[in-house]
Image: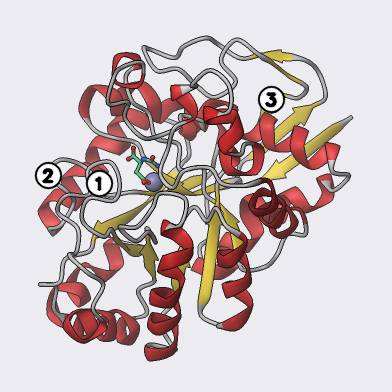
């Protein structure tokens, strides 16, 4: 059995910078036509100079592969219309992090207060710049995403022309919110389609599955699967592949993030085939994002075949999801 994926897109990717960027970028660039690059560097990507510098370093790290790094800017409440208008052609979206909710988000916003931040959202809406959001409250870890839904609703209602992407959704509440507002969209990761909290902490602790937002309950995973498997047009694949060195994961104070870029497409093919919906994978990993973001990525065809594939234990010091395990699909060719 085989499937050919045309122009796969990863609409939520952490490529990091410098040495780590050099290590991980080739894996995304090989298998994907493009990706939405997250801006949570230290310091974050908040100026045109930093953005263009980062884009150039990404271009250097991907070398000759045809791969489009769609850039994002780290949301600051100080952005004004002129700044956003000037940078608009260099970015695909602006990413908002509430301060402190995840890796390198300390420079994020303190409270998503619509009145305070309204002028920035207004400017983005006028300029047609989508807003990507890490939607978690400061509450109990399992409730953070559900508690954030009213913020999404308020945003969606107050700025009906602003495209709002609920990033890496993990709950049935978020899936349900998609239906209530035309301008709400979502990305779903590979790991949240596979795991629940049980896989992370139900037996021995598995630090390489620890991420933000944390994996939730079986009924939440079921809702995510239903949305992805049906190729819901407002749902896009965003791996949230977030590499951390092994020693930062296998440590007290384990860093949040799951590294999935090298295994994403085989693992998705396996999951979609097992659910009997392999035909819908194309929409989930590319077509939906092309429509939502209006992008036309470089041509690439990834041929996947149903043959066992043993996942590496480590990629340059980073442990991937499924390390050392066998997946049922592998990439046979990239054209
Ligand atoms: C991400 C990272 O490491 O940058 N971590 C994570 O757990 N997902 C940040 C993020 O997307 O939350
Ligand atoms: Zn992320």
Q: Is mark 1 within 8 Å of ligand 1?
A: yes
Direction from residue 176 to residue 101 in the image, left or right: left
Dot label at residue 51: none
The residue at the point 43 percent across, 77 percent down is 150
Tell me if I can see residue 335 in this picture. Answer: no
Category of crowding for the residue at label 2, using alpha-carbon neighbours closer than 10 angstroms: few (below 14), some (14–19), many (at least 20): few
| Image position, residue 146 (x, y; %) | 48, 64
3D distance between C-alphas at marks 2 and 3:
36 Å
92 shown above or below 273: below
Q: Quarter of the image for the N terminus: give it.
A: top right
Q: Earlier in the sequence, mark 1 or mark 3?
A: 1
Asked whether the beta carbons under mark 2 and mark 3 sit within 8 Å of each other, the answer is: no
Badge 3 element: strand
Task: List the residue tagged with mark 1.
Answer: 40
The disc at residue 43 is 2
The residue indicated by pointer 3 is: 331
In this rendered view, identify the residue nearer to me: 123 or 331: 123
- On the rendered structure, is 57 left or right of 298? left
């Amino acid at each position: 059995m085989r499937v050919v994926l045309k122009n796969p897109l990863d609409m939520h990717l952490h490529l990091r910078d410098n040495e780590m960027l050099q290590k991980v970028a080739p894996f995304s660039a090989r298998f994907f036509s493009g990706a939405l690059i997250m801006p949570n560097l230290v310091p974050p990507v908040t100026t045109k100079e930093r953005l263009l510098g980062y884009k150039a370093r990404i271009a250097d790290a991907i070398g000759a592969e045809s791969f489009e790094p769609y850039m994002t800017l780290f949301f600051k409440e100080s952005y004004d219309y002129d700044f956003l208008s000037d940078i608009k052609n260099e970015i695909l979206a602006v990413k908002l992090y509430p301060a402190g909710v995840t890796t390198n988000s300390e420079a994020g916003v303190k409270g998503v207060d619509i009145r305070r931040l309204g002028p920035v959202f207004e400017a983005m809406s006028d300029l047609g710049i989508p807003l990507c959001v890490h939607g978690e409250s400061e509450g109990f870890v399992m409730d953070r995403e559900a508690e954030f839904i009213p913020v999404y609703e308020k945003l969606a209602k107050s700025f009906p022309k602003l495209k709002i992407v609920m990033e890496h959704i993990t709950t049935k509440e978020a899936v349900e919110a998609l239906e209530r507002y035309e301008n709400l969209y979502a990305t779903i990761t590979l790991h949240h389609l596979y795991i629940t909290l049980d896989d992370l902490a139900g037996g021995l602790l598995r630090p390489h599955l620890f991420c933000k937002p944390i994996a939730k309950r079986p009924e939440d995973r079921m809702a995510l699967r239903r949305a992805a498997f049906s190729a819901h047009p407002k749902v896009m694949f965003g791996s949230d592949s977030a590499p951390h060195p092994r020693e930062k994961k296998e440590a007290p104070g384990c860093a949040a993030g799951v590294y999935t870029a090298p295994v994403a497409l085989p693992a998705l093919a396996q999951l979609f085939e097992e659910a009997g919906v392999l035909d819908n994978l194309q929409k989930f990993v590319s077509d939906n994002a092309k429509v939502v973001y209006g992008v036309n990525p470089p041509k690439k065809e990834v041929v996947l075949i149903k043959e066992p594939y043993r996942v590496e234990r480590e990629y340059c010091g980073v442990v991937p999801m499924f390390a050392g395990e066998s997946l049922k699909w592998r990439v046979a060719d990239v054209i």
